[in-house]
Amino acid sequence: MGSKYLNPHKTRTNYEDAIGKTVRVTMKIDNIEETGTAVLNGQEWTARSNDDAVTIEADTTAEVVAISGVKLIVKPQ
């Protein structure tokens, strides 16, 4: 009853909309050390640089270039 209208396999997250957004880095992003967090829309995410050779300091901003699983992939602004 009514369940034919539900689609349990499709959840709209809108995280695709995050690409191109500016985030605030809250912990230094260093791919080699596997550290880094950033805040997007009030939520803290694990973050990694799109370039292993580039670290991004805390209290700076970065641009989201991709999402990989539950990690933001960012580049410095």
Image (cartoon, rainbow, N blue to C red):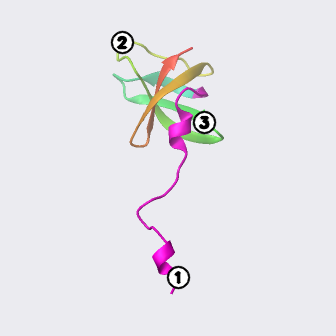
Q: Residue at x 40, y 21 (%)?
A: 50
**Disc 2: CA contacts within 10 A as few (<14), some (14-19) or many (>=20):** few
Residue closer to the observer: 9 or 1:
1
Residue type, label 2: Ala
Residue closer to the observer: 57 or 62:
62
Magenta-highlighted residues: 1-25
Residue type, label 3: Leu
Dot 1: element: loop
**Residue 15 belongs to magenta span:** yes
Q: Is residue 64 left or right of residue 42?
A: left
Residue type, label 1: Gly
| Mark number displayed over residue 14 | none
Which badge, 2 or 3, comes first in the chain's sequence? 3
Dot 3: element: strand
| Dot in front, 1 or 2 | 1
| Dot in front, 3 or 1 | 1
Q: Which residue is drawn at 56% across and 37% down?
A: 17
| Mark number displayed over residue 53 | 2
Q: Mark 3 points at which residue?
A: 40
Residue furthest to the right? 42
| Dot in front, 2 or 3 | 3
